[in-house]
Image: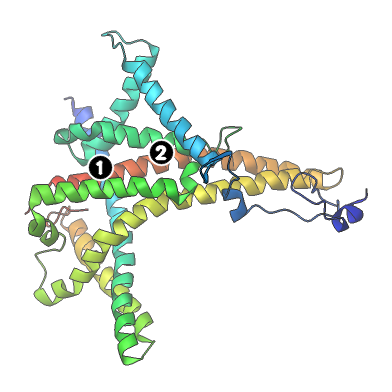
Amino acid sequence: MTGAVAASAGSCDVFSAHLFSGCGFQAPGLQDFYFKPLFTVDGFGFTKPMLVAILCVIAVIAFFWVAFRKPKLVPGHTQSLGEMGILAVRDQILRPAIGRKGDKYLPLLVSLFFYIFLMNLMELIPVFQFPAMSKTGFVIPMVIAVYALYLYLGFKNQGAWGYISNMWPHDVPWPVLILLIPVELLRFFIIQPFTLGIRLFANMFAGHLLLSIFMLATWYLASLSIGLLFAAGSAVMVLFIFLLELLVDLLQAFIFTTLTATYIASSLEAAH
Amino acid sequence: MSARNQRDSGSEASGAQGIAIGWTVFSYLIGGMAAYGGIGWLIGRVVHVSLLFPIGMLVGLGISVGYIIYRYGRAASTGGDKTWKRA
């Protein structure tokens, strides 16, 4: 079947579309973030992102359980690796933000960091190839949990009025203070948690889209023509984006966890 | 703790604070535009002047930028944000 006949027969899809085949480039889009359910239970569809999330949870729990179920003074390989991970979060994220008094929040920060990092890495692992954090349904509950925690700690440590009054500066003239109050209230209660979540979601969404575009472009351009040259260029871009996404995956996990630690620190501080 | 560890922990603390300050500045910009844009939109609905919404956003942006310069610009010139530690 020639390309024109194939196109007219409506048999163009991602797999059959190549350069000069008569089929246009099937660009990835929003439709690639929605999955048909793997199975349905009482109308509830269980999809691939949910499977990815559950596997990540199991993997993180399993790793730390195996690493520390029988801790030794002279650690083995897994225990060493687990200790490096925990100490990295403690020394690079928790202690700089909160100090020693924040050590009781280490389990939360370690869990957040490794869960987010592994969920992000799923974008690059064959078979999975989807970052579940590119769906807001996985990001929002984490943001709500962090938000509820630092609000609770703030109200508990500083009292309701003390916590709210500490949001705005006390060393500015009162006309300026009146102007600043709406900004501070909106920033603290709405913008701060919103940006915490949207930053992670948007980076993963954009990264997945970028990787998909270049991978599909490589496939589309790979025809027995001049397109092979462009396919090679696109393949190089895939490698570059892969490495970039590896960095972004780690960075976004680090930033989310660091900001969580910072918000907890600001809630724990007593009023000036 | 060795001197190198003290330097390292100090630079890590400033790194974490740097990330927090950066995103705080961004939040101030968005918050200012949203707060005063919202106020302008509400007043605009009452008085039927839709231009108050973008004017409010610009006013909010100006207030945010002014406050960011006041708080972080002054902190930089005096060697640290001594007046207010909340991120």
Residue A217 location in percent, x, y?
Answer: 71, 48
* Front-most of residues A32 and A182: A32
Q: At numbered mark 2, what does the secondary structure look like: helix, strand or loop? A: helix
Label 1 packing within 10 angstroms: few (<14), some (14-19), many (20+): many
* Front-most of residues A172 and A186: A186
Q: Amino acid at mark 1?
A: Ala
Residue A101 location in percent, x, y?
Answer: 14, 35
Q: Quadrant of residue A241?
A: top right
Q: Chain of mark 2?
A: A
Numbered label tally: 2
Q: Tag 1 or tag 2, which sits nearer the N-term?
A: 2
- Location of residue B18 with respect to A247 vertically, above or below: below
Which of the image's four quarters has the N terminus of chain B? Answer: top left
Residue in the picture at 32% in, 41% down: A257
- Do dots 2 and 1 share one subunit? yes
Residue in the picture at 29% in, 36% down: A109
Residue A261 is tagged as 1
Determine which residue is flagged by label 2.
A116
Determine the CA span between mark 2 and mark 1. 15 Å
Q: At numbered mark 1, what does the secondary structure look like: helix, strand or loop? A: helix
Residue A225 location in percent, x, y?
Answer: 86, 46
- Location of residue A23 with respect to A73 vertically, above or below: below
Residue in the picture at 11% in, 69% down: A172
Q: Are marks 2 and 1 in contact (CB under 8 Å)?
A: no
Q: Chain of mark 1?
A: A
A46 left or right of A78 in image: right
Q: Amino acid at mark 2?
A: Ile
